[in-house]
Image: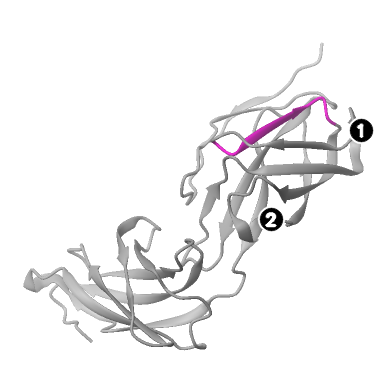
Amino acid sequence: MTKFLCKTVLLFVLFAGFTPYSTACSRPPGYGFIVLATLLDESKPLPMYQNIGGQGLGGTFQHCLSGCQGDQSQWTGTTASDGTLSELNKSTPAQWGVSFSTPEQVFQCTGVFVLVDFQPSTSPQRAICTINQTRDAISSSPSSFDTSTGTYQYTVTMTDTSEAWPRTPYSFTNYDANGTVIASGTVTVTDSWDCWGTFWANSTMSVTQYLWLADSSGIGIGYATISVTNGTGGGG
């Protein structure tokens, strides 16, 4: 009798719009796979992933891994709202080349080609489109805030210290050190290096926080690191 291993997996990850899948069940060779289209924007302060629903994908067989079985023909499809696309009966375990095509949801991903080693499993396996592998250094003024005064709202000027804005800043998102979103808003551009926005510290303890800048398409430019204190000075 053949036994297949099913295990419960608890995921602690920073996923914006990510749906965790708690049960992973291995299957026999040739079962196929479920691909999960994923966006990784490395301009953010911490690695953050987002499932891409409604994204066109295509797959081309590359080579077998140990003991592969199943259909090796090309496939195409569009991901469901949770970013998944089932390709059952396809060759597994095997390496496939996955291309991001149309319909597109993230224009920077169109044409991206990644290699994925798919295992025969009911657990979705990620095909990751990585954008902004380099980010600009952003400074903020002031760079520290003291909330012991009861003031949590500040006007902050953010400056690109790497270059003139590569894309026009449109919005900011304030993250704490764990990647939790504290606040967000729009910014006003004053020149080719500077912009400003209203920032909510929203903290009663000493903590490092981040202000992440993005353009109007939601694609990141970079982030500033700020210090929020409570009763230990600040406002620098």
Residue 51 lies in what quarter of the image?
A: top right
Q: What residue appears at the point 8 percent right and 68 percent down from the top-left corner?
A: 150
Mark sitting earlier along the chain (2/1): 1
Q: Which mark is residue 167?
A: none
- Distance, label 2 to label 1, CA atoms, is 33 Å
Q: Which mark is residue 67?
A: 1
Q: Relative to residue 57, is residue 157 depicted above or below?
A: below
The type of residue carrying mark 1 is Gly
Where in the figure is residue 174, as x and y percent of width and height? 33, 64
Where in the figure is residue 30, as x and y percent of width and height? 85, 26
Where in the figure is residue 4, as x and y percent of width and height? 73, 21
Q: Relative to residue 40, is residue 86 depicted above or below?
A: above
Q: What residue appears at the point 92 percent right and 33 percent down from the top-left corner?
A: 67
Q: What residue appears at the point 39 percent right and 58 percent down from the top-left corner?
A: 178
The type of residue carrying mark 2 is Thr
- From the viewer's perspective, tell me whether residue 160 is left or right of residue 97: left
User: In the current view of this chain or complex, which residue is farthest to the left?
Assistant: 149
Q: Which mark is residue 110?
A: 2
Q: Relative to residue 193, is residue 23 depicted above or below?
A: above
Of the pair 179 and 168, the residue shown nearer to us: 168
User: What segment is highlighted magenta in the picture?
Assistant: 82-90
- From the viewer's perspective, tell me whether residue 152 is left or right of residue 10: left
- From the viewer's perspective, tell me whether residue 116 is left or right of residue 218: right
